[in-house]
Every structure is written in C-alpha cells, then in structure tokens.
Image: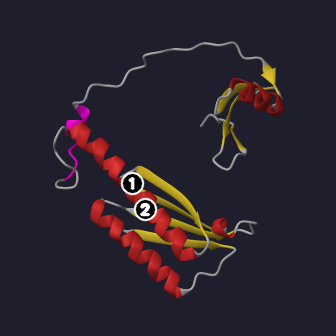
Amino acid sequence: MELQITGKNVKLVPTARRYIERKLGKLSRHLPNIRESKVEVAEEKTKSPEQRFVIQVTIDSNGTLLRGEERGENLFVAIDKVVAVMDGQIERYKGKLYDKGRGSSFARSEFNPEVEAAEPEKKVTRIKRFAVKPMSVDEAISQMELLGHDFFLFFNADTEGLNLLYRRKDGNYGLIEPELG
C-alpha cells in the first residue's frame, strides 16, 4: 500500500507520521487490496478548539474510492476519529460486495467480478422532467431553500449551462459546473 501524507498549515513531526502509518496500516487487515491511501492533515484557525485539526483520508481499493473526513482538538484525536469513519466505510463496502456475491465473503476470499456481472442490472424506476429557466446562483440558492432540498439543478444564466448547487456539511454551498471531456 502506498501512503501519501501531506500537511497544510501544520508541520508533521515524525511521531505523527508514524501514528498515521500505524493506524492506517490496520485498515489493510480489513481490506487487503488497498492500492493507495492519501492523508491530508490541516490545521485551521477556528473559534472552536474541538474543530482545529482536520484529517481527510482517501483510500483507493482497485478503483473504488473510500473517503472520510473528521475534526478534532488535536492531531491524534482527529486521526482516531477518521480511522473509525474509514472502518465504517470499509465495512459498508464489504457488505455491498458480500450482498452482490451472495455469500462469498470478500473478507475471506478475493472478489470475483464474474459474480458481480451476473447480478441483475439496476434500472431507472422514475423519470422526472421539469422546466428550467435561466437564473443566477443567488436565485438558485433561494429556490433550493424554498423547496427545502439539499441540491438544486438549474440553468446558470452567467455560464449558460446546467449547474448543480448542493448544500455542504459545513452549511455553505457547492456548485458543480460540468464540462464535456
């Protein structure tokens, strides 16, 4: 497993690096085919000391990405929290593989892609159509709030393209502007 550790606004001491390596190394016991793990450590200047350190972990397991982010009052608490989150992500992922394989546990054997291919395809059960009118991002935020949704698809009058507006965990908004490629 390749492990990349980067720090933002924080100097990572060797003890912290070893702690991260040891904790993430334990995840490979649960999911043996982890190719690469990326850990981003950041220290933010927040009013709340419990939210000061942010740890983001992204695991690549044969093309499947598992991601977790947690905050803590110190680096080691945040690492422990994010490892617990990643453990849950791995368990959910393995559960889905177990269900697809109908009994061939991924933890006990390698995943067989032929079993997955034999699964019935998921299908679209509902199609929803709606008229979109050109609007600004601010108007889209207002519409999304009025509807009480966590996301809103709209035609952006400024960029003249479809955009997806979504609510982030921190209460702010994110905007997805697709590009053809």
Q: Quadrant of residue 40 in the image?
A: bottom right
Q: Is residue 131 left or right of residue 99?
A: right
Q: Quadrant of residue 45 in the image?
A: bottom right
Q: Nearer the viewer, residue 29 or 116?
A: 29
Q: Which residue is mark 1?
A: 88
Secondary structure beneath dot 2 equals helix
Q: Is residue 125 above or below residue 15?
A: above
Residue 32 shows in this picture: no
Residue 91: give x, y in percent of width and height: 33, 52
Residue under the point 54% across and 58% down = 69
* Amino acid type, residue under disc 2 in the picture: Ala
Residue 163: give x, y in percent of width and height: 69, 31
Residue under the point 62% across and 72% down = 73
* Res 5 label: none
Q: Is residue 149 left or right of residue 94?
A: right
Q: Is residue 118 magenta?
A: no
Residue 140: give x, y in percent of width and height: 77, 28
Q: Are marks 1 and 2 in contact (CB under 8 Å)?
A: yes
Q: Which residue is mark 2?
A: 84
Residue under the point 73% across and 45% down = 172
Q: How is the image coloured?
A: secondary structure
Secondary structure beneath dot 1 equals helix
Q: Nearer the viewer, residue 33 or 152?
A: 152
Q: Main secondary structure of the magenta part?
A: helix
Residue 175: give x, y in percent of width and height: 70, 39
- Distance of label 1 from label 2 (alpha carbons): 6 Å
Q: Is residue 113 magenta?
A: yes
Q: Tell me the magenta residue range.
A: 110-117
